[in-house]
Amino acid sequence: MEAVRVRSSYRGQGIGTSMFRYAISRAKEKGCSILQLTTDKKRPQALLFYESLGFVATHEGMKRKL
C-alpha cells in the first residue's frame, strides 16, 4: 500500500480507518496473504495508527540523499 493520506484537517474522523478496513477486506477477498506499507519514523502518530490496524514493524528501511 502506498501514498495513502488523509488531509490533516480531516484526520481523527475515522476516514483513514475506514479506508484501511476496506482495503484489508478487499485484499482478503482477493486472496492476498500480506499487506505491506512504509512510513516515516518521524511520524509516531502514523506508526501508532498502523499498529492499531494490526500492522507490525518487521523491517528497517534505508535511503540516501544525493
Image (cartoon, rainbow, N blue to C red):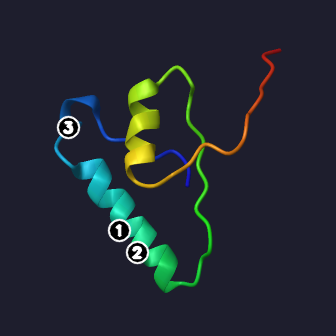
Please provide percent x and percent y for residue 4: 45, 47
Vertical arrangement, residue 56 with respect to residue 46, above or below:
below
Secondary structure found at label 1: helix
Please provide percent x and percent y for residue 29: 47, 85
- Label 1: how many Cα within 10 Å (few below 14, some 14–19, many 20+): few
The answer to which quarter of the image holds residue 51 is: top left
Residue at 37% from the left image edge and 47% from the top image edge:
52
Please provide percent x and percent y for residue 15: 24, 50
Q: Which mark is residue 25?
A: 2
Secondary structure found at label 3: helix
- Label 2: how many Cα within 10 Å (few below 14, some 14–19, many 20+): few
The reply, left or right, for residue 5 in relation to residue 32 is left
Q: Which mark is residue 10?
A: 3
- Label 3: how many Cα within 10 Å (few below 14, some 14–19, many 20+): few
The reply, left or right, for residue 54 in relation to residue 12 is right
Vertical arrangement, residue 62 with respect to residue 28, above or below:
above
Measured Cα–Cα span from mark 2 to mark 3: 23 Å
Q: Which mark is residue 39?
A: none
Q: Are marks 1 and 3 in contact (CB under 8 Å)?
A: no
Give the number of the mark in front: 2 or 3.
2
What residue does disc 1 label? Answer: 22
Q: Amino acid at mark 2?
A: Ser
Q: Amino acid at mark 1?
A: Tyr
Measured Cα–Cα span from mark 1 to mark 2: 5 Å
Vertical arrangement, residue 27 with respect to residue 63, above or below:
below
The reply, left or right, for residue 58 in relation to residue 56 is right
Q: Amino acid at mark 3?
A: Tyr
